[in-house]
Image (tube, rainbow, N blue to C red):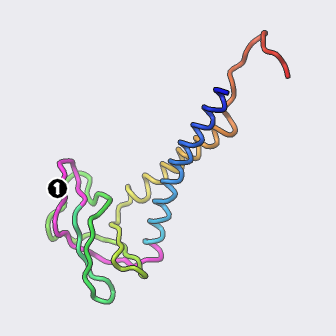
Amino acid sequence: MGKLFIQSFIFIIGFMVLAAGASNLYKYFNYRFWGETTYGFVDHPSSGRGLGGRPLIHYKDSSGAKHEFKSVAKTHWFHRPKTGEKIKIYIKKSEPQRAIVDSLFFYLFFPILCVIVGSYCCLYAILFHKEQGGGANQVPF
């Protein structure tokens, strides 16, 4: 019973990590290859105390309409973005009010790492998780 619980737990955790990574990869590729590339400008740098920042960005779509969004991904890792700074973003063609910043770490490197770790956990739980040997007093079935 304990072995099954541990295998199930490892599989569920691995699947959650795998799904989160795959979802971010799908989102990035959807915006990157089927969206539109444009540049936005920082309206307000992040208000957080940490390094980097998640700024408020405004941009114009291909029809000239103005939009703004608060970035989910950090645009810089070691310093805050400055007001008026130009940042590369990707927007959805069908919904130009939805956009993401071009952040390889947040949308590519980290999700690939999550997919690898999640896949390893799932495969380990299914294929490689074996009970340690019981020695001479093990009953063969």
Number of numbered labels in the structure image = 1
Question: What stretch of residues is rendered in magenta?
Answer: 32-54
- 125 relative to 34, above or below: above
Residue 53 is a magenta residue: yes
Residue at 26% across, 53% down: 77
Which of the two residues, 97 or 33, is positioned nearer the viewer here? 97
Q: Position of residue 8 (x, y in %)?
A: 62, 38
Residue at 27% across, 82% down: 60
The residue beneath circle 1 is 47
- 35 relative to 2, above or below: below
- 68 relative to 4, above or below: below
Q: Quadrant of residue 1?
A: top right
- 12 relative to 24, above or below: above
- Secondary structure of the residue carrying numbered label 1: loop
Q: Position of residue 52 (x, y in %)?
A: 23, 53
> Which residue is situated farthest in the left direction here?
83
Which of the two residues, 64 or 6, is positioned nearer the viewer here? 6
Name the kind of residue labelled 1 in the image: Ser
> Which residue is situated farthest in the right direction here?
141
> Which residue is situated farthest in the top direction here?
136
With 22 as the anchor, is 57 left or right in this view?
left
Query: Which part of the image, by quadrant, shows the C terminus?
Result: top right
Q: Position of residue 85 (x, y in %)?
A: 18, 69
Q: Position of residue 129 (x, y in %)?
A: 66, 32
With 33 as the anchor, is 139 left or right in this view?
right
Say few, some or many: other residues with alpha carbon within 10 Å of mark 1 (under 14 / 14 to 19 / 20 or more). few
Residue at 50% across, 47% down: 17
Residue 102 is a magenta residue: no
> Which residue is situated farthest in the bottom direction here?
63
